[in-house]
Amino acid sequence: MPSIVVVGANWGDEGKGRIVDFLAADAAASIRFQGGNNAGHTVVNDFGTFKLHQLPSGIFNPDCTAVLGPGMVISPAALSEEIAEVKAAGVSVKLHISDRATLCLPLHALEDTLEEQRLGDAAYGSTRQGISPAYGDRVMKKGILVGWLKQPEVLLERIQFMLDWKMPQLKALYPSCDFSQSAEEMTEWLLEVTAPWREFICNVTEPLKAMQNNDASLLFEAQLGAGRDLVYGEYPWTTSSNVTAAYAGIGSGLPTLRPERIIAVAKSFSSSVGTGTLVTAMEEQDNFRETSNEYGATTGRPRDMGYFDAVATRNGIELQAATEIALTKIDCLTGMKDLKICVSYEGEHTQNPIWPQTAALSPVYEEMQGWSEDITACRTFDSLPQAAQHYVLSIEALMGVPIKMVSVGPERDQMILR
């Protein structure tokens, strides 16, 4: 059975959650390999509508084990709340949580917030969940590992070590910092709040290797998209981890992974939340944002809306080494009078091999014919209006990679397979 990696081709919010939920019906494990609760995957299925932030989107398949990999930073209280939410909906939770993952603590969220406030107008647009400071502590070898939750004496020792190093810096840089929790209090809180999931902590490599040896299908899920990758994204307006498919094996606990399929999810239009450059931004966004429900799943912030950017998306497809594309939310384009695709840029840095990083760029558009028919009930490509088919095929030609999945609505079965 294949190993499938599902990643984002744009800046995140492409609809990866609904693609993973769809594919998880045939998967033995659904694995998150990076990030934390700073972004959400919206899933709509028979259990209801969920905004998952740390749990893999395959959690709803009763035969699928959800795995939180070592590449993640885990916010303990938020994870407990998320587990309780899906359990309350009737989901049978099967979890493996990596002992090598890093804890994202309330102190990290405070540090994140204080830094965004200090930066003012130059802020990065962080969700202020503490992701960057948690990853930073890991790199500085001051991070708190999930596995230490099973060794309270080690946990206390490492928290004290971290506080002795961190607090003098925070109080010097942020005079308003009033964090006063002791190492003992932090340890006690952690042991209390992680009680619902501590039993699931393990070396996730072992069960995943066993599944591989049994020829099981494994599904790997990234957060955000190529434009937010720490190395290859629109730096410094990136996330703090590697979101490309190349990191899936390392971040999941299977460093030798060689996936058979890499599905890059791309939205049929452009959207971005946070800070950065959206070259194809629409002049009038409000109505389209409302009808497309384009608000951040974590913060509720309105997303910037734009026309489909073939240049940036093709770049993302290449960075992800995608074997195929899943195109989402094409139903949102129904009735759009002004439909077009950005096929190239004009201006400075048009040959930038990574991501456009300047507002000096201007888009060159190809006008497209719109359609007015309701396509949410379409289940074959031929049943789409000719204009919608042409739109998909035009994107496919520009990407150079086949579009094998076309989403025509948020429900699990609103999918066209090509």
Image (spheres, rainbow, N blue to C red):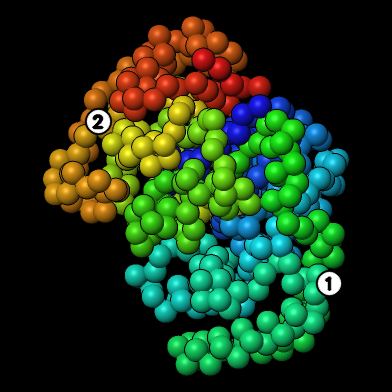
177 up-or-down from 146: above or below: below
For marks 2 and 1, give the CA distance: 54 Å
> Residue 343's mark?
2
Could you tell me which residue is drawn at 51 percent across and 40 percent down?
7
> Residue 405, how many percent across, how many down?
52, 23
Quadrant of the rendering where the N terminus is positioned: top right
Position of residue 194 measured from the top left corner of the image (x, y, whole percent): 79, 66
> What residue sits 58% from the left and 26% below the top?
409
As drawn, is 271 to the left or to the right of 221?
left
Percent from the top left, x then y, of residue 370? Answer: 36, 18
Left or right: 197 as drawn, with respect to 286:
right
What residue appears at the point 61 percent right and 22 percent down from the top-left corner? 414
Tell me residue 59's x, y (percent).
74, 41
Q: Secondary structure at mark 1?
A: helix
Sequence-first tag of 2 and 1:
1
| Of residues 149 and 396, the one drawn nearer to the viewer in this rendering | 149
Residue type at mark 1? Answer: Glu
Residue projecting furthest to the left = 347
Contact between marks 2 and 1 (CB within 8 A): the answer is no
Q: How many marks?
A: 2
Residue 397 visible in the snapshot: yes
222 above or below 369?
below
Foreground residue among 155 and 183: 155
Query: Is residue 371 in view from this perspective?
Result: no
The foreground one among 184 and 151 is 151
Mark 2 surroundings within 10 Å by alpha-carbon count, few (fewer than 14), some (14 through 19), many (20 or more): some
Name the residue: 83% across, 72% down: 192
Identify the element where label 2 is drawn: strand
Residue 50, numbered circle = none
Q: Which residue is mark 1?
A: 192
